[in-house]
Amino acid sequence: MSKKLALIHTSATLVPIFQELVEEYLKDKDIQIFNIVDDSLIKNTIERNKLTPDTARRVVNYVGSAEEAGADYIMVTCSSIGAAVESSEILTSVPVLRVDRPMADKAVAEGKKIGVVATLPTTLEPTSDLVQRRALAVGKEIELTSKLCEGAFEALMNGNAQEHDKKVAAALIELTDTVDVIVLAQASMARVVEQLDDIDRKIPILASPPVAMEYLARIL
């Protein structure tokens, strides 16, 4: 009997991205996928510059709805609402995963000096916190460098993807010489890595979606 994987998104643009990853990493698995999308979750978080209790409660409710819909495993694909995802775990009888946890674990395993890059403070803080806690869980001391790409998110929202990519690339290149591994706090930055010269990609640069799918392929 096939299993059901629920993906909870804060943007409809993530649905096709994760569908491609499902086809790449889970094609040999007998798994049905369904999506829940509500972009007001991330819009409210950005507007208020933090994850507020009412938004967190709605995230928990969506996780509950996914379980009621028959999900055997649930993954929430937005890093900014990660704290709410963790809160939902104890209220849900099926496994719940925040998308950036496998990435954080991989970063901790691969290096001591870890860089975290984001274009939003609402994503930078929870991702940095997650990396620190995952290191603590395995008893490893790390040196964390968090870098916010000021103005990059605004440029992307205004249709200036080139300016966004330029700012993110500059941050990545700056960190390359000072850390062992870089974590991208937002999946939207992953395409910038492909634009970098080989010399600027001499250390691992991790994006959460493919790492999370690799993780799911191993455990499902």
Image: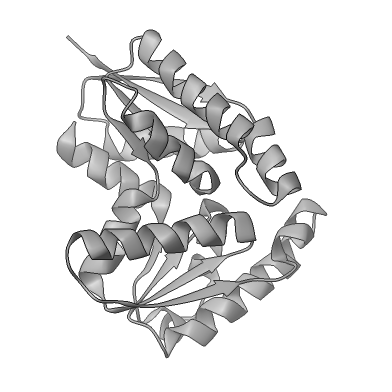
Point 62% across, 61% down: residue: 121
Image coords of residue 173 (percent x, y): 52, 83
Left or right for 80, reference 32:
right
Left or right for 70, reference 28:
right
- The quarter of the picture where the C terminus appears is top left
Residue 87 to residue 3: above or below: below
Residue found at the far right of this picture: 158
> Which color scheme did the rendering employ for the protein?
one colour
Residue found at the far bottom of this picture: 177
Point 24% across, 45% down: residue: 215
- Front-lying residue, 31 or 48: 48
Left or right for 28, reference 210:
left
Image coords of residue 131 (percent x, y): 36, 62
Image coords of residue 214 (percent x, y): 26, 46
- Front-lying residue, 93 or 100: 93
**Number of numbered discs visible in the structure rendering:** 0
Residue found at the far front of this picture: 53
- Front-lying residue, 152 or 56: 56
**Residue 76 visible within the image:** no
Point 48% across, 29% down: residue: 8
Image coords of residue 196 (percent x, y): 51, 76
- The quarter of the picture where the N terminus appears is top left
Residue 211 to residue 2: above or below: below
**Residue 52 visible within the image:** yes
